[in-house]
Image (cartoon, rainbow, N blue to C red):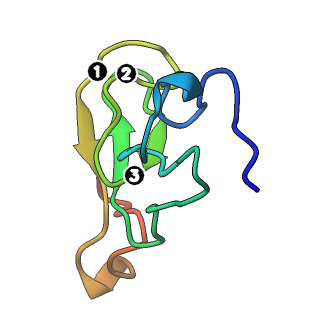
């Protein structure tokens, strides 16, 4: 049986009680399923530069709590390791 979490997710900033199915940002599910994969893109907050790995960038930054622009900083070329790695030039 899966333990239902309480409080605010540090990764996506959502209240766990508001997640009814599966969070598209952090992969948390009250049913125990997780869709987060190792090849999910990396997103960097435009304000505090926090890096989050998720299918989509969070609505609010889990670090600064602001609604920020997130930049996809995932590596897509073999030079920096390909998907699953951060592009050091970004």
Residue drawn where x is 33% and y is 75% of the image: 83
Q: Which residue lies furthest to the front in this view?
A: 1
Q: How many labels does the image show?
A: 3
**Of callouts 2 and 3, which one flags the residue occurring earlier in the amino acid sequence?**
3
Q: Quadrant of the N terminus?
A: bottom right
> What secondary structure is marked by label 3?
loop
Which quarter of the figure has residue 25? top left
- Other-residue count near label 1 (Cα within 10 Å), few / some / many at <14 / 14–19 / ≥20: some
Q: In this view, does 68 lie to the left or right of 60?
A: left
- Provide the residue designation for mark 2: 60
- Other-residue count near label 2 (Cα within 10 Å), few / some / many at <14 / 14–19 / ≥20: some
| Place of residue 64 in the rendered image (x, y in percent of width and height, measured from the top left) | 49, 16
- Cα distance between the residues tagged 1 and 2: 7 Å
Which quarter of the figure has residue 87? bottom left
- Cα distance between the residues tagged 2 and 3: 13 Å
> What secondary structure is marked by label 1?
loop
**68 versus 42 height, above or below:** above
- Provide the residue designation for mark 1: 68
Q: Residue furthest top?
A: 66
Q: Are marks 1 and 2 in contact (CB under 8 Å)?
A: yes
Residue drawn where x is 31% and y is 83% of the image: 79
| Place of residue 61 in the rendered image (x, y in percent of width and height, measured from the top left) | 42, 24
Depth check, mark 1 against mark 2: the one in front is 2
**90 versus 9 height, above or below:** below
The numbered disc on residue 54 is: 3
Which quarter of the figure has residue 67? top left
**Of callouts 1 and 2, which one flags the residue occurring earlier in the amino acid sequence?**
2
């Amino acid at each position: 049986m899966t333990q239902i979490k309480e409080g605010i997710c540090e990764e996506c900033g959502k209240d766990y009680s508001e997640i009814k199915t599966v969070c598209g940002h952090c992969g948390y599910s009250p049913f125990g399923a997780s869709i987060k994969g190792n090849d999910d893109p990396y997103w960097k907050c435009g304000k505090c530069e926090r890096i989050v790995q998720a299918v989509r960038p969070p609505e609010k930054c889990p670090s600064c709590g602001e609604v920020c622009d997130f930049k996809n900083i995932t590596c897509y070329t073999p030079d920096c390791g390909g998907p699953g790695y951060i592009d050091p030039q970004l």
